[in-house]
Structures are given as structure tokens and as C-alpha cells.
Image (cartoon, rainbow, N blue to C red):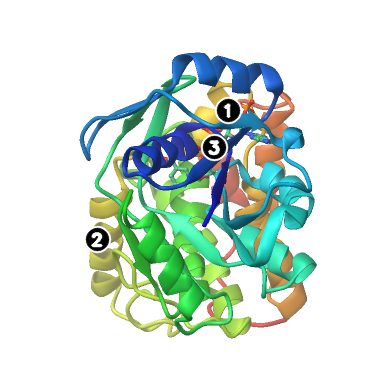
Amino acid sequence: MQVLIVGMGALGGTIAARAIQAGLPVRLAARSADSAAALRRSGLRVSGIGGVARADAIDVAAIEEYGPGDRFDLILLATKAQDALEIAPRVMGLLAPHGVILPIQNGGVARVLADRLGEERILGGFSNLGATMVEPGVYEQKNAGHLLIGELAGGVSERVEWVAHILGRAIEVKVSANLTGAIWSKLLINCSVTTLGALCSQTMRQYMETEAGKKVFRRTYQEALSVALASGIRLERLAVDPIPPGWPSRLAAEERYESWVEAVIAFYGDVKPSMLQDFERGRKTEVDFINGYVVTSGRASGVPVPMNTTIADVVHQIERGALQPTRERMYELADQACEPTLGSRS
Ligand SMILES: NC(=O)c1ccc[n+]([C@@H]2O[C@H](COP(=O)([O-])OP(=O)(O)OC[C@H]3O[C@@H](n4cnc5c(N)ncnc54)[C@H](OP(=O)(O)O)[C@@H]3O)[C@@H](O)[C@H]2O)c1
């Protein structure tokens, strides 16, 4: 049995260090020969939640150095979304006969890969485990989270249980029989809590102090929820119920909606949005797989998605340096937020 972890950033490095320390047969792929050589010299170290793990002797190479002689039963893609899409077709040839690729990015990545490469080779997964990279080879685990994995078609298969068993020796792994529902439930949070926070450079708790923030959050979330339901997704409860009380009736007591919002804020409201960190580092974001994925899916299922379309566009403008993330973004978005079309289809 051989495992390849691709991407030695925050999550890949943390999982790799814990996997190697646990004695798993893990090989690693970095972006370039130079970064692989640097990692060979430094080894891997993780601290923080979950304790210290250290891997001094690591088997790491640049991704293009892996070839026909290498065969893996599991390839864990721990890069950003756009890199995962590029890498997956290239590493297909490295899979053993029953080998699988496990992408762990948020949003639409696993579904897009399965559509392109086949569900028989692609599992679904995402991370509730939070980690940062202090410097190459040095990582900090930020919470006691887990990987949630499963079959995109639903149900629990032997291969998913096998992957959970293997990776579970290193980190906490849970299996979902409704992984696609769980991916969408997290996507609803990502496209509202995370992206909106990034656009206005605030946490959700901060932007929800303004009427503009409340209005834009509600519109963004409800649009994405309409898309999910119209696409036939059976949403999975994560930290909070993905469906606000009374949905889709406009007559639902506001009080109950407000307490649902409070529950969302209590769980997600104080986290610095990861997309804001991308802006700060001048990196491309994953918005195409978050709000952009809602837009694509909305168009496919005939659900209007004007707010998510605008949000994705604003994020692209910030990436290009044409706009900056500021509080005023929320007021501009609120001006564009007409009344929510609850559960409606065009
Ligand atoms: N970190 C978290 O706490 C967390 C939590 C939940 C979900 N996620 C998701 O997990 C994914 C990974 O996140 P992350 O924070 O670990 O990202 P990250 O720190 O940016 O790590 C990504 C790594 O992939 C490497 N990479 C890019 N292209 C590659 C290639 N062609 N071959 C080999 N390696 C390549 C990057 O190398 P370079 O540095 O050279 O580009 C980088 O080391 C993202 O989708 C993120 O949204 C992360």
C-alpha cells in the first residue's frame, strides 16, 4: 500500500507529518525540485492542537518526477483548488488498479474532477481541520478538526472505509454517507461567511453588525441554498442546520431566523476568512469553486444567482488589484441586493 500526498502547504504538510510519524507508507509531492530539496533538508514538523509530530527522513520529490514506475493506492490532493484541477489528470496514471484520488478542497472541486475523470477514481472530501504553514516544513495545527470523506454518489463503500482507516491512523477522519450534501452545506457557509468577510475585510460577526451585512448575507446564502435544493442536493447538517427556519416561506418568524443567524455567528463568526489571507498575500483565491460554483450550478438548474455572480466578479477585481477589500464593499453589494427570491426558479 502506497500513499502520495500532493501539496506540502498548511494542510498537506500537517497531514504528511502526522502520517509519517504514524508509520504510514507515505511519499510526498512538492511543486518543484527546489522545494522538494528544501523539504528533504528541513523535514516536517507540526505543533499545536494534536501535539508535536516530526518527520526527519521524508520521501519527497517534485510532482513531475513521479512516473510510470510509481503506483499509489491513494493520492491525497492537498493543493489549492485550481492546482488540484490541473494535477489530477496528470496523477491519474500513477494510480494502482483500484487506486483513488482524494481531493480535500472546499466547494465544487471533487464534483468537477469526478465529471472529468470518473467517479470510480475520485472520492469526495473536505477538511474541518485547520492548519497554517509557519515556513516550508513547519506547520501548526489550529484545531481538533477532522477530514470528512465519502463517495460523491452517496452511501458508504469499502474503499471509503479503507481510506478512513488508513488516514485515521494519522488524523481524525469521519465518513459521510451523504458527502455531496455535506460539501454543499459547507459551500453555503463558504460562499457567504468566508467570501463576504474577505470582501469587506471583517469577520462575519463584525459585518453582521450592519444592516447592509445582514441583507447581503441573507441574499447570498438564500441564493446558494435555492441552487442546492434545485440541484437535488439533500443538505447535511454540519455545525448548524443548513436550512434556516421556515424556509422557503417569507412568513417565517423573523425571530427564529435571527436565532439561526446567531447560531451561525457563534460557530463561524470569529474566524478570519481564509480568502482574506489570499488577498493579503496577493494569491489567486478559490472563488471560482465557491461562489463561482454556485453561479455555474445555478445557471444549470435555472436558479437566478445575481448576488453570487456579483460577488465572484468583485473577488476577481480584487485579485487583479482593481479593487481593495474594504467595509464599503458591503454597502455597494447591499445596494445591488434586491429582495430575495426565496426558493424561486426562473
Ligand atoms: N489550511 C487550512 O486550515 C484549510 C482548512 C480547510 C480547507 N482547506 C483547503 O485545503 C486546500 C489546501 O489548503 P492549504 O491551506 O494547505 O493551502 P496552501 O498552504 O497554499 O498549500 C498548497 C500547497 O500546494 C502546493 N502546490 C501547488 N501546486 C502544486 C503542484 N503542481 N504540485 C505539488 N504541489 C503544489 C503549493 O506549493 P507553492 O507554495 O509552491 O504554491 C502549496 O505548498 C485548499 O483548497 C484550502 O481551501 C485548508
**Mark 1 and mark 3 residues within 8 Å of each other at the beta carbon:** no
- How far apart marks 2 and 3 lie (CA) works out to 22 Å
The one nearer the camera, 224 or 253, is 224
The residue tagged 3 is 199
Disc 1, SS? helix
Which of disc 3 and disc 2 is earlier in sequence?
3
Q: Hey, what amino acid is under mark 1? A: Phe
Which numbered marker is on residue 263? 2
- Circle 2: is it few (<14), some (14-19), or many (20+) Cα within 10 Å? some
117 relative position to 42: left or right: right
Q: Quadrant of ligand 1?
A: top right
- How far apart marks 1 and 3 lie (CA) works out to 9 Å
Disc 2, SS? helix
Q: Hey, what amino acid is under mark 2? A: Ala
- Residue at left 54%, top 66%? 124
- Circle 1: is it few (<14), some (14-19), or many (20+) Cα within 10 Å? many
The x and y percentages for residue 332 are: 59, 41
